[in-house]
Image (cartoon, helix red, strand yellow):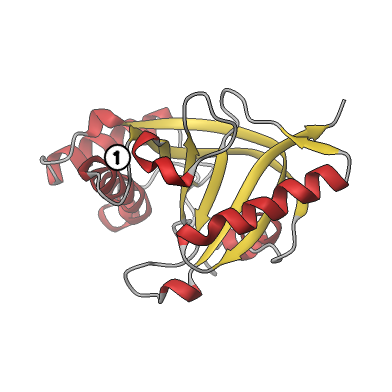
């Protein structure tokens, strides 16, 4: 049986054009960890990623030890994502990375329930006791109407792509709708450890609403 690859199955969510476009994002299930600070300097950020991948692969590989949950199917672990915000700012200011608040997350298959989450957390705590599994949460999130594009290049060059999103929204009768739970959103399709900065691919997504 072919594995479900969310990136290929839902190209409108994970493989957008370099030109801004509207997208209506449905509800999804995530493992998520919250934190703050500059991700380039934060030990907490690195720990969060290790925890998210440990949780995600524990669920994926559960078939190997016969603990797979009801409804399990073969799939590719979806890419890492991040929600970013700063207090008192609409969007984000890259010159003040130390003020970042972030929610790092990885999408989960539809069969992941609270029970599956708790079983995975217990397994990770046993296998990797250095990780604080109390930091991870199961999160359902419906992002709704957004504008997005594919950014190619270093993360620090993202402001130019963000300006394209802002201009597109304005020119098409929308406005960015940053609010509680609606943040600057990035989906990381490249591994920065293996990919040259100029070739990094990142989906950038901003919440919008009709200009009233």
Q: Nearer the viewer, residue 86 or 113?
A: 86
Q: Which class describes the residues within 10 Å of circle 1: few (<14), some (14-19), or many (20+)?
A: many
Q: Is residue 30 above or below residue 194?
A: above
82 is higher (above) or lower (below) than 113:
below
Q: Is residue 40 left or right of residue 113?
A: left
Determine the image quadrant of residue 35.
top left
Q: From the image, tell me which residue sits under label 1.
A: 120
Q: How many marks?
A: 1
Residue 6 falls left or right of residue 41:
right
Foreground residue among 57 and 68 = 57
Position of residue 100 measured from the top left corner of the image (x, y, whole percent) = 40, 36
Percent x, y for residue 139? 47, 31
Residue 4 visible, this angle = no
Front position in the image: 116 or 179 = 179
Hey, which quadrant is residue 137 in on the image?
A: top left
Q: Position of residue 9 (x, y in %)?
A: 65, 61
Q: Quadrant of the C terminus?
A: top right
Please name the residue shown 42% across and 37% down the image. Answer: 103
Query: Left or right: where does residue 98 sit relative to residue 41?
Result: right
As helix, strand or loop, the secondary structure at mark 1 comes to helix
Image vertical order of residue 171 relative to residue 2, above or below: above
Q: Residue at x 33, y 53 (%)?
A: 57
Residue at horizontal 27 percent and vertical 36 percent from the top: 121
Q: Is residue 86 left or right of residue 12?
A: left
């Amino acid at each position: 049986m072919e594995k479900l690859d969310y990136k290929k199955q839902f190209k409108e969510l994970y493989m957008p054009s370099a030109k801004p476009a509207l997208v209506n994002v449905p509800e999804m299930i995530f493992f998520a960890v919250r934190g703050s600070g500059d991700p380039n300097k934060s030990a907490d950020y690195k720990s969060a990623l290790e925890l998210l991948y440990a949780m995600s692969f524990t669920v994926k590989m559960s078939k190997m030890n016969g603990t797979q949950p009801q409804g399990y199917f073969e799939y590719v672990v979806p890419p890492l994502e991040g929600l970013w915000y700063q207090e008192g700012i609409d969007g984000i200011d890259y010159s003040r990375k130390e003020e970042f608040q972030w929610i790092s997350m990885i999408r989960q298959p539809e069969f992941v329930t609270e029970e599956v989450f708790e079983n995975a957390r217990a397994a990770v705590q046993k296998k990797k006791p250095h990780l604080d599994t109390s930091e991870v949460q199961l999160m359902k999130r419906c992002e709704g109407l957004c504008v997005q594009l594919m950014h190619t290049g270093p993360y620090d060059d993202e402001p130019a792509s963000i300006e394209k999103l802002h201009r597109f929204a304005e020119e098409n009768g929308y406005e960015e709708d940053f609010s509680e739970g609606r943040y600057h959103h990035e989906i990381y399709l490249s591994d920065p450890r293996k990919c040259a900065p100029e070739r990094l691919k990142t989906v950038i997504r901003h919440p919008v609403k009709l200009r009233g």
